[in-house]
Amino acid sequence: WTPTYAKGDKEREYRINLIDTPGHVDFTYEVSKALAACEGAILVVDATQGVEAQTVANFNLAKELKLKIIPVINKIDLQSADVERVKSQLVDAFGFDENEIILASAKEGKGIEEILEKIVEVLPPPSGNPDQPLKSLIFDSVFDVYRGVIVFLKIVEGMIKANDALKMLSSPGRAYKIEELGVLKNLKMTKVETLSCGEVGYFISNIRSAADVSIGDTVVNAKDALSAPLPGFRKLKPLVFCGLYPVNASDFDELRASIEKLRLTDASFIHEPESSPSFGFGFRCGFLGLLHMEIVQERLEREYGLNLILTVPSAGYRIKKRGGEIVDVDNPAKFPSPQDIDECEEPYVSVTMLVPTDNLDAVHELSRGKRGIYNATEFLGADRVKVVYDMPLAEILVDFYDRLKSSTRGYGSLDYEFIGYFPAKLVKLEILINGEPCDAFSCIIHKEMAYEKGRNLVSRLKDVIPKQLFEVSIQAAIGSQIIASEKIRAAGKNVTAKCYGGDITRKRKLWEKQKKGKARMKQFGKVEIPQEAFLEVLKI
């Protein structure tokens, strides 16, 4: 948003570019690139929620870039607002002076004038030399069905003219002729002839896929010699993976088309086709995190009217084979056999939790139960504490956040950051139904936790699989070793109901025939697991 703000006697106008950033951990990279395009930051804290883990993470990102930060408490108009408590948190956590904190209500327009005045007063103007070769930073992009990708960028050095051809340093072989160059002024796209250093604007160049534009990439003039890119660029790599299947198998083609359309606007998730004996045809998808996964699922269901099944999310593992080959495994079906594995590595994250002081012991217990390695504790005032643990990504994927909220009566928050791969004793846990593997319930898990997970799975399956006319054996296995087992007894049928008296040998013949029939059914019969059973078990 680019408002034009007049200060004083209107003898001078100020153009202020405001970039709204997501606060969630899954999009930390996008936040860092948006901050890199700015000279300062406004740290907005909810008056009802206070400082959360994501607040700390984004504050640290801004401090690393040496940005001037303006603290603002928003939603002061709400009855549940606790302004004094939040003020105290900002002072204790970040060292702000209480007098520099601005109180605001976006709903009622309170504090807006003060924020604009503070921006003009304390934030430095953009720097740069317009005579230098062009160098600009992509901080965002959106997809328009009719015009293609609209690329938003900050000019760091040099200038862009409306008839220039540009190239991106991540793919220097392509040149893009500018079709439209402009700025965002009062929420409207306004064409301009030039953009000079320090300015924020956009260009349109008939780019038909969002995958061709990378956040953080450096844009230069196509006729200039290749120069060093701006620091900090990296290709986004998915951390969380799961299977995505239509509830109705006939919707597969529609799901494929919907995913391809969604990829035009969100290139940060990946997908590849896969098939499952349990669910049919679907896709294996990779996401930046759990929230990103939920957003993609919601958009597919809401915008395209699909009814979907998501398998249990998993992390991506790194396996070193005995021959020296290193493979990335995000699907249990691709996990090598134990005799081929030399070493396994799993991704670890640094988890920062902000919790009430009274719940500190419960949080420590929860974190240790998730194989967490204690890192640090910092008290932020009398009633809040920051706790940092290093733990496997897989341990926080399913229920960690819910359990943290439960342990802290809803007041806890968390933020996590990928820190690398570390050695781990990993195994593939399989569920066998009458000796046949059921891929929908297979998972990669730490060896120490495999027994408990296996017991839970077979116990839950015993409760949800309906009785058959033959006995059903449910087993959890690691390789050839059975670690847990349950049996579902055969449904009874009285084959002698129509026999009234007479010779007992007649009944014995019927019982013997039934016994042989059940043995044959157990050998050749297929256990039909209803859809509801899959959905119920995937919750654990």
Image (cartoon, rainbow, N blue to C red):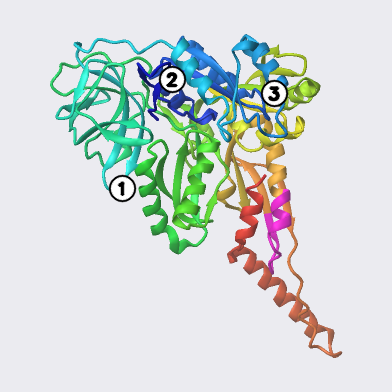
* Residue type indicated by callout 2: Leu
Query: The residue tagged with tag 3: helix, strand or loop?
Result: helix
Mark 2: few/some/many CA within 10 Å (<14, 14-19, 20+): many
Do tag 1 and tag 3 residues touch (Cβ < 8 Å)?
no
Mark 1 or mark 3, earlier in chain: 3
* Residue type indicated by callout 1: Val
Mark 1: few/some/many CA within 10 Å (<14, 14-19, 20+): few
Q: Which residue is mark 2?
A: 35
Counting the numbered discs, the total is: 3
Q: Is residue 222 magenta?
A: no
- Identify the image quadrant of residue 255: bottom left
Residue 275 position, x and y percent, is 45, 52
Residue 509 position, x and y percent, is 75, 81
Q: Is residue 461 magenta?
A: yes
Query: The residue tagged with tag 2: helix, strand or loop?
Result: helix
Q: Nearer the viewer, residue 325 or 78?
A: 78
Q: Which residues are magenta?
A: 459-473
Query: The residue tagged with tag 1: helix, strand or loop?
Result: loop
